[in-house]
């Protein structure tokens, strides 16, 4: 069977009825729809993809815009996330496209071009900010999107995030239980929601233990950022015996700072991070960390976006996923210090 017209003629139905049955419209009875689908399958009929997209007003694509700033995505995590997203979208009949933006101004222009030109059916928003203009714009124009992370906006939007606040609270409490009292935080920039939440978890655990929580230095989300921040903290009059780092890449930089100071990671200064990137397992000693499953994030984000494209209400679509600790040799008991 080579055409929609021939399929309709064989079934004794109008071309419109056959077309709407294949596109899943509810005004075609279940029995008729199944009859059309069975006949199309038997005759190896395949609808013309471009014509179908034009008819439905759909691009059959979804898009993720990657911020281009250094440290926003470590490559292994980025690939793992895209793999999970791509597989789930493919199963739902969508192609995943990925675009990069070098700075916030270019990023806004990319979003506007995609939305106003109807070049995609939905968007995945990465690395959310406390005051995120991308979220505000997309929510106000009611375009389907899912954010990876939260913001402080009061607008309703679909999102998936890890419970970084609880994870960093628990990690800091474990250091306290190991006898550490001088614990410092190598922080992410405060503009990012995940940075604020992880810092808040650290501060709450320190406060609960009756310890000060002002030993905090922020840096770029790179090894160099962690190196610079840790150098500052280790240069204090009463240097820390433990460094809690917002990301693994920052933690790897902090480990270098510890070694530069003539100290041993895990014995003199404990170091831990977040992300469970592969490089952490090959550090010496191996890096204690935490992990938010990118497979779970990608699956949930994709399912939510497909639902939104289908007309779901974003107010019912949000999920906070657990972050799991991974204990390795970079964390140990507090060293004996002079009074």
Image (cartoon, grey):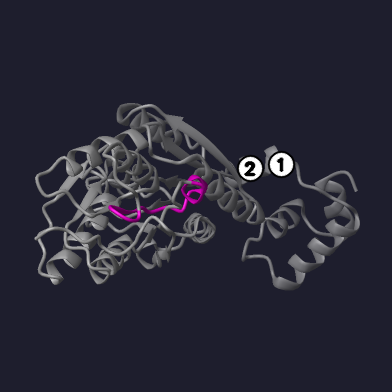
The region drawn magenta spans: 266-282
Q: Residues within 10 Å of mark 2 (few under 14, many from 20)?
A: few
Residue 49 - label: 1
Say which quarter of the image contains residue 2: top right
How far apart in space, not on screen, are marks 1 and 2 (Cα)? 6 Å
Residue for point 25% across, 72% down: 177
The reply to whether residue 153 is in sight is no
Residue named by callout 2:
53
Residue occupying the point 38% across, 58% down: 159
Residue 20 is left or right of residue 329, and the answer is right
Q: Are marks 1 and 2 in contact (CB under 8 Å)?
A: yes
**The C terminus: image quadrant:** bottom left
119 or 210: nearer the eye? Answer: 210
Q: Magenta includes 209? A: no
Counting from the top left corner in percent of width and height, residue 64 is at: 48, 41
Residue at image x 10%, y 69%? 210
Residue 86, percent from left and from top: 60, 48
* Image point (51%, 61%), residue name: 296
Relative to residue 75, is residue 105 drawn left or right?
left
Most foreground residue, 222 or 89: 222
Could you say whether the residue bearing mark 2 is in a helix, strand or loop? helix
Q: Which mark is residue 243?
A: none
Q: Is residue 100 above or below residue 279?
A: above
Please state the total of marks drawn on the protein image: 2
């Amino acid at each position: 069977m080579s055409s929609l017209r021939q399929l309709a003629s064989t079934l004794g139905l109008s071309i419109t009825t056959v077309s709407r049955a294949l596109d899943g419209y509810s005004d075609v009875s279940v029995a008729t729809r199944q009859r059309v689908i069975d006949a199309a399958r038997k005759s190896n009929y395949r609808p013309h993809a471009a014509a179908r997209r034009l008819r439905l007003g759909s691009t059959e694509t979804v898009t993720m815009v990657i911020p281009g700033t250094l440290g926003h995505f470590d490559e292994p995590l980025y690939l793992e996330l895209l793999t999970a997203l791509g597989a789930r979208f493919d199963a739902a009949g969508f192609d995943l496209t990925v675009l990069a933006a070098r700075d916030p101004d270019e990023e806004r222009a990319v979003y506007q071009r995609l939305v106003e030109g109807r070049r995609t059916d939905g968007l995945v928003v990465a690395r959310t900010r406390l005051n995120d203009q991308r979220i505000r714009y997309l929510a106000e124009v009611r375009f389907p999107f899912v954010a990876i992370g939260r913001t402080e906006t009061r607008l309703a939007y679909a999102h998936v995030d890890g419970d970084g606040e609880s994870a960093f609270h628990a990690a800091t409490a474990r250091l306290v239980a190991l006898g550490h009292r001088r614990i410092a935080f190598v922080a992410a920039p405060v503009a990012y929601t995940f940075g604020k939440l992880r810092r808040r978890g650290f501060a709450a655990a320190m406060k609960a233990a009756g310890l000060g929580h002002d030993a905090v230095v922020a840096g770029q989300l790179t090894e160099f950022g962690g190196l610079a921040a840790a150098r500052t903290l280790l240069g204090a009059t009463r240097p820390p015996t433990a460094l809690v780092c917002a990301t693994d890449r920052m933690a790897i930089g902090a480990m270098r700072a510890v070694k530069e100071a003539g100290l041993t990671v895990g014995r003199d200064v404990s170091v831990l991070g977040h992300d469970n990137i592969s490089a952490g397992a090959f550090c010496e000693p191996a890096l204690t960390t935490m992990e938010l499953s990118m497979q779970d994030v990608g699956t949930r984000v994709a399912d939510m976006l497909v639902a939104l494209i289908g007309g779901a209400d974003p107010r019912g679509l949000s999920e906070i996923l657990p972050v799991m600790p991974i204990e390795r040799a970079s964390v140990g008991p507090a060293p004996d210090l002079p009074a």
